[in-house]
Image (cartoon, rainbow, N blue to C red):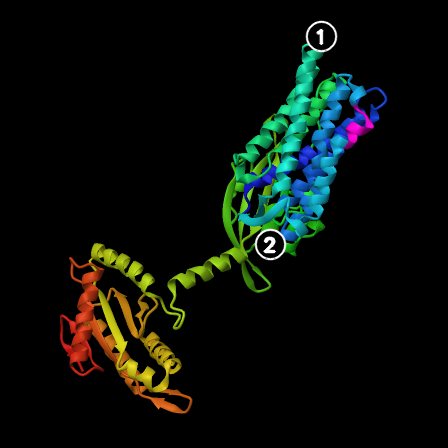
Amino acid sequence: MMNIFIFNYIVIISISGVFSVLLGILAFLKRSRVKGSGTFILINITSCFYVFGHAFELTGTSLSEIEWMVKIQYLGLPFISPLNVLLALQFIGLDKYITRKNMILLFSVPVITVIMIYTNSIHHLFYKSIILHKEDSYLLADYKIGIFYIIHGSFTFGCLFAAFCILIWHARRVKSSYRFQLAAMMSALLLPMTASFLYLVGKAPYNMDPVPTIMCLTSALYLTAILSSNMLVVAPIARDRIIENMRDAVLVMDKANLIADFNGAAIKMFPELNNSIIGKEFYGVWGNMLPNAVLPEVLSGDSASFEQEIEWNRNGELSYGLLHSFPVYKNANQLAGRAVIISDMTKEKIMRNTLQQMAYRDSLTNIFNRGYFTEKTAEMIETCKISNMPLSLILFDIDHFKQINDTYGHAIGDEAIKHVINISKKFIKPEYILARYGGEEFVISLSGVSIEEAGGIAEETRKKIAECPLITDGKIIHITASFGAAEMSNHQNLNSLFHDADQALYESKKRGRNTVSIRPAALYI
């Protein structure tokens, strides 16, 4: 299942990256008329490395991919804050302090930071470790920081704070007509400082760096200050790199439910998709893609977002997924169409089923275990009481099982247990519960079955076990079992019913074993 918050976060920071590119281009075109345009261009270039690297980190599918995306981020991230100091000096006319010596001092830590990131696997002074965890379909990284990360973080925050202090110091001396530009620049510094602080104190959602999401606003504020004009308005164009690298299938429709676009992950998930479906009605394509899934009518129009579990056949095997659909709007809340995102949950579903089976099944016999029997039989008892139906319990174990183990070994003992269960299964209907209660002891819950019927089932099972010896490794081992059955009364719970069945089993053992005893009723021999 795709986490829509993280998806939106990736889209926002991708737009921020695109915004930085366009603002950098604009500054380049106006470089001859704008003071500090060269520094501003460098800020946008380094911001692009940082922002797009972070976006690709969030779409990474392995530790190695995430580590490389982090390295790409740090080709830009360490240089942004000292470049802000440089821009602040240029903006207020303190170019005399931009000397070669000061430039070396200002950018020495960022250069060392890049070196430390690219050699971190040797010394682990920047990140001690990277721990991955899943949030729905996304793989996120938690970083255990080292000593040089603290140096880098302190330097970064210190540069931003220094640039802010330079602007405050200058604010007292400027005319009122320039205060708007100055306020814009100070806001552009305060925003990443605040976002960084929230990230460092662990207040960011999913512990994700929030700074990239505000980079577009920061760039716009800077451009406002430099050009003394209105903020630019740009449309997001990051689709090719972000949407195409998503692991989830994405399909886009127009208002008439005609397919307008889809990504590469959709083709991998549904090989039937190709460019010929562009412009075709989604419902028709849906029937070929997911013949077993029901498509809700709310997919049409401007209905709210919804999620639906789906399944389909892939190469003869059943696959599972989660479909998320939501409307897409233009400006002024004008409906443009809908987006459908399908997350492949097959591995998760199989794993969940496997874990569920491990939780409820006995590993040796593959019948239900004691925990499942206790839970489900207690429910059955309450249901039968309400509907005034009978319920019976059969308890049985293998006679002289210790002697089998001592004589033939535990491996043959396990074979004897499986042999008895294989015979017993022939007399157990699907609605009954056959479980291994412990060791060589087994229990059967029979909903809607009277004690007389339960006794008959127990007797047939007993006879068949006695008539069918275990033949293994050239040995013929005769096996018998003793049975006790009891029927639920109106005021009984599972514990008292089990106690009655256990007493009936005890009576069978007293009578010499290989018999069936029931409570209350006749005796089977």
Is any atom of residue 253 visible in this view? no
- At a point 78% along the width and 29% down the height, the residue shown is 103
- At a point 64% along the width and 36% down the height, the residue shown is 151
Is any atom of residue 4 visible in this view? yes
User: Mark 2–mark 1 contact, CB under 8 Å?
Assistant: no
Look at discs 2 and 1 and give the one toward the viewer.
1
Task: Tell me: residue 250, above or below residue 520.
Answer: above
Picture quarter with the C terminus: bottom left
Q: Where in the figure is residue 265, as x and y percent of width and height?
A: 65, 51
Name the secondary structure under disc 1: loop
Three-letter code, disc 2: Met
Residue 195 circle label: none
Three-letter code, disc 1: Lys
Q: Main secondary structure of the magenta part?
A: helix
Q: Where in the figure is residue 446, as x and y percent of width and height?
A: 26, 67
Residue linked to disc 2? 289
Q: Where in the figure is residue 232, as x and y percent of width and height?
A: 72, 24
Q: Earlier in the sequence, mark 2 or mark 1?
A: 1
Cα distance, mark 2 to mark 1? Answer: 66 Å
Name the secondary structure under disc 2: helix
User: Does residue 103 show up magenta in the picture?
Assistant: yes
The answer to which of 274 and 49 lies nearer the viewer is 49
Quarter of the rendering containing residue 328: top right
In this rendering, position of residue 332 left or right of residue 311: right
The answer to which of 110 and 340 lies nearer the viewer is 110
Residue linked to disc 1? 175
Q: Where in the figure is residue 397, as x and y percent of width and height?
A: 27, 76
Magenta residues, start to end: 98-104
